[in-house]
Amino acid sequence: MSYRLRIHHLEEAHENLKNQVFAMQQNTHWNDYQLNQLKREKLRIKDEIYRLQKLEQDEPELEDTHYDNADSNDY
């Protein structure tokens, strides 16, 4: 799976968790443990998004690398 696709899936999961946290906080009797678990997972996903974005930026472009197969027969 490409970095871009994985980042997209993680961003969707992060948005879903954000909505769950918001909905839980609207309830006057939310469960602190569940809320903290959702927030931790949301933070873990955000960290993973940043890590993948960094890897994506640092990865050399494959299209820029050109290997000429004709040169490989020069032994």
Image (tube, rainbow, N blue to C red):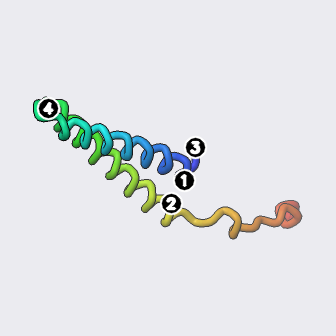
Q: CA distance from mark 2 to mark 3?
A: 12 Å
For label 1, the crowd category at 10 Å Cα-Cα, with few meaning under 14, some 14 to 19 and many 20 or more, is few
Q: Given contact means CB atoms under 8 Å apart, are the residues at marks 2 and 1 in contact?
A: yes
**Residue at position x 70%, y 65% in the image:** 63
- Nearest the eye: 58 or 35: 35
Between circles 4 and 3, the one closer to the viewer is 4
Q: Secondary structure at mark 2?
A: helix
Mark toward the start of the polypeptide (2 vs 4):
4
- To which quarter of the image does residue 65 belong? bottom right
Q: Given contact means CB atoms under 8 Å apart, are the residues at marks 2 and 4 in contact?
A: no
Farthest residue to the bottom: give it.
Answer: 64
Q: CA distance from mark 4 to mark 1?
A: 35 Å
**Residue at position x 50%, y 49% in the image:** 8
Q: State the image coordinates of residue 38 (x, y, percent, origin top left).
A: 25, 37
Does 28 sit left or right of 45 as displayed? left
Mark toward the start of the polypeptide (4 vs 3):
3
Q: Secondary structure at mark 1?
A: helix
- Nearest the eye: 49 or 34: 34
